[in-house]
Amino acid sequence: MNSIIFTVEAEESGGYVASWDDPRGGGITTQGEALVDLQANILDAVRCHFAEDSRPSQVKLHFTEDLVLEPA
């Protein structure tokens, strides 16, 4: 498996939830208060879910909504 794609959704109360559904059943769901937290939690979950020899080489994030930056 070369890559997997997590679907990322912003929560109304703040933070993000990311999920990946394994085509063989099961999957991974994790969350983070900020994007940096979410990224770390995703990578940690992927390391725990996959054996080292079957771990994907890439983890892609698909956001259900575009991120908006508001310059000060």
Image (spheres, rainbow, N blue to C red):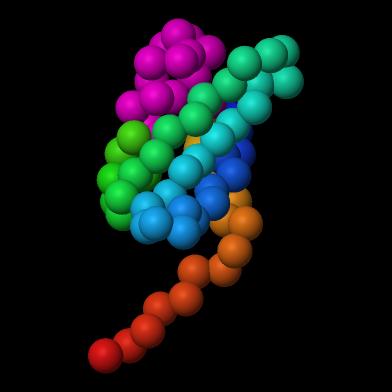
Relative placement, left or right, of 5 versus 51 is: right
Residue located 38% across and 20% down the image? 47
Does 53 appear above or below 62?
above
Q: Is residue 4 within the magenta segment? A: no
Q: Is residue 45 within the magenta segment? A: yes
Q: Residue furthest bottom?
A: 72
x, y percent for residue 11: 46, 54
Residue 60 appears anywhere in the view: no
How would you classify the magenta stretch by its main secondary structure?
helix
Does 66 appear above or below 18?
below
x, y percent for residue 3: 59, 33
Q: What span is in magenta?
A: 42-56
Residue 44 appears anywhere in the view: yes
Residue located 62% across and 57% down the image? 64
**Quadrant housing residue 66:** bottom right
Q: How many marks?
A: 0
Task: Tell me the quarter of the image containing the N terminus.
Answer: top right
x, y percent for residue 30: 43, 33
Residue located 55% across and 35% down the image? 19
Relative placement, left or right, of 43 versus 26 is: left
x, y percent for residue 34: 31, 54
Residue located 59% across and 64% down the image? 65
Task: Tell me the quarter of the image containing the C terminus.
Answer: bottom left
Quick one: 51 or 61, which is closer to the camera? 61
